[in-house]
Image (cartoon, grey):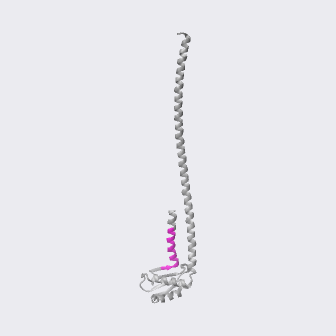
Amino acid sequence: MSLEELRKSVMQKAREKAAKIIEEARREAEKIIDEAQHEYKRRLERERMKALSELREKWNREYVSRSMEVNMKLLQLKRALLDNLVEEAKKRLIELPPKAREQSIKNLLKDSAGQSIIKDKFVIKVLARDVEVLKNALKELGLDEEVEEIKEIDEKYLGGLILENVDGTIAIDNTYSTRLERALSILYDEVNKEILKG
């Protein structure tokens, strides 16, 4: 074989080997690029899910925070409304017309005396302005003989009466202020339950 033929043969084998190496390198490069693209997509998806999760958590925290703020403001508003209601109720009780006050004293007296807790004579406490109304109600109900004494109570009670046994160990408090407090306690509980539901 001549030198020229040998050179051509070597060159041919070198080209074939180079072509083979280039083809393998190309396949390897495609494989690396394909794996890199898959890894990129996996990381991108993982980062997207992480960002979405963080965003959801942030929105949830903000929602809970805002809900609590709204509930607190709502509670404050309801409390303010109830406080206004209480003041209006107190004002109306203080300004109760004479006939209505008379009927109220009579009803409270029946209720207190009808509980059968106090068996013997009793003491009744009312506002100074209601003493005469009470005396009339006692006569009308036939209870005037059972009264040991009529005492005056402070204006803070708003009206109504307190019926006690003579030694003061048993008392039935039917004053307007106490009845109002009982009603408000129920109202406040209902408002609080309603706020917690919302």
Tell how many labels.
0
Of the pair 164 and 187, the residue shown nearer to us: 187
Of the pair 104 and 147, the residue shown nearer to us: 104
* Image spot of residue 147 (x, y percent): 46, 87
Question: Going by the image, does 95 lie left or right of 142?
Answer: right
Residue 110 colored in magenta in the image: no
Question: Going by the image, does 122 lie left or right of 90?
Answer: left
> Which portion, as a residue range, is magenta?
173-190
Which residue is depicted at the point 54% across and 17% down? 12
Which residue is depicted at the point 54% across and 20% down? 15
> Main SS of the magenta segment?
helix
Name which quarter of the figure residue 94 lies in: bottom right
* Image spot of residue 73 (x, y percent): 57, 63
* Image spot of residue 95 (x, y percent): 58, 81
In the rendered image, the residue lying farthest to the top is: 2
Of the pair 179 and 126, the residue shown nearer to us: 179
Instruction: Judge whether residue 167 can be spotted in this image.
Output: no
Q: Is residue 159 above or below residue 57?
A: below
Residue 175 colored in magenta in the image: yes
Instruction: Judge whether residue 63 can be spotted in this image.
Output: yes
Question: Going by the image, does 109 lie left or right of 94?
Answer: left
Of the pair 39 and 113, the residue shown nearer to us: 39
Which residue is depicted at the point 48% across and 79% down? 173
Name which quarter of the figure residue 81 lies in: bottom right
